[in-house]
Image (cartoon, rainbow, N blue to C red):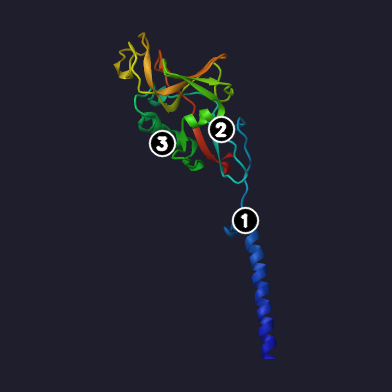
């Protein structure tokens, strides 16, 4: 009799455990559900246009259902004169005032919790890995520039020119400024400046990464890594 009672109690305990386990796994607020049924996310394809914070962005890299974030490139040019960053920067990107502004004020305005750090950045500019992922590049040593072939329109905006974070070569040119601070009046003076980074400049016929420019304007297209849940 005692043995039967023990068996019955064991069965009851197992049934209760089974029922509780089923409830626990199906409760969306429990972490264990993610173990048995991993969360899936929306897929995004490169070049796709999405809206985030009332702005349009291009998907820069494919993102599958298992990945919880997507990398986006701004569809618009950002001019930062009103934020105290009017001219090109002399420092490498990581040490520049522009980088500090994007990582702090810019991300805070968009909601810093919406972003994930990827390869050291939550926000950045285009790098050479991005460029090589889309186009074939041919280097022109004479002018320290790259010709880009078959560049997609969402990457090389027609008739647009904007900064990248790709550092230029350490070359010397005749009658060329190497420091924007050396130019007395950047707005009205005539000059050629060798940038510390390449500027992606496009027309309807050509696309280039140039280092020699005749103005100090700073326009950027931020690249951000956004949690997909923030896009819903």
Task: Write down the residue under mark 3.
Answer: 104
Which quarter of the rendering shows the C terminus? top right
Q: Is residue 100 above or below residue 33?
A: above
Q: Is residue 27 above or below residue 195?
A: below
Which quarter of the rendering shows the N terminus? bottom right
The answer to whether one can see residue 26 in this image is yes
- Between circles 2 and 1, the one closer to the viewer is 2
Q: Is residue 5 above or below residue 210?
A: below
* Quadrant hosting residue 3: bottom right
Q: Secondary structure at mark 2?
A: loop
**In contact (CB < 8 Å): disc 3 and disc 1:** no
Q: Residue furthest bottom?
A: 1
Task: Write down the residue under mark 2.
Answer: 60
Q: Secondary structure at mark 3?
A: helix
Q: Residues within 10 Å of mark 2 (few under 14, many from 20)?
A: many
Lower sequence index among marks 3 and 2: 2
Q: Residue at x 35, y 20 (%)?
A: 171
């Amino acid at each position: 009799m005692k043995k039967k009672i023990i068996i019955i109690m064991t069965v009851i305990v197992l049934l209760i455990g089974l029922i509780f386990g089923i409830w626990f796994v199906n409760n969306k607020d429990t972490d264990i559900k993610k173990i048995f049924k991993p969360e899936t996310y929306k897929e995004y394809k490169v070049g796709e246009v999405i809206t985030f914070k009332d702005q349009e962005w291009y998907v820069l890299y494919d993102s599958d259902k298992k990945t919880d974030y997507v990398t986006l490139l701004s569809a618009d040019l950002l001019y930062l004169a009103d934020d105290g960053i009017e001219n090109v920067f002399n420092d490498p990107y990581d040490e520049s005032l522009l980088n500090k502004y994007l990582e702090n004020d810019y991300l805070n305005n968009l909601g810093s919790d919406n972003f994930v750090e990827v390869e050291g950045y939550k926000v950045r500019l285009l790098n050479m890995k991005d460029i090589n992922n889309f186009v074939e590049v041919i280097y022109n040593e004479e002018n320290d520039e790259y010709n880009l072939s078959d560049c997609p329109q969402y990457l090389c905006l027609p008739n647009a020119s904007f900064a990248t974070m790709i550092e230029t070569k350490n070359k010397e040119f005749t009658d060329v400024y190497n420091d924007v601070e050396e130019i007395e009046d950047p707005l009205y003076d005539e000059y050629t400046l060798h940038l510390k980074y390449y500027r992606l400049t496009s027309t309807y016929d050509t696309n280039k990464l140039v280092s020699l420019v005749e103005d100090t304007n700073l326009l950027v297209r931020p690249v951000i890594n956004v949690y997909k849940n923030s896009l819903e």
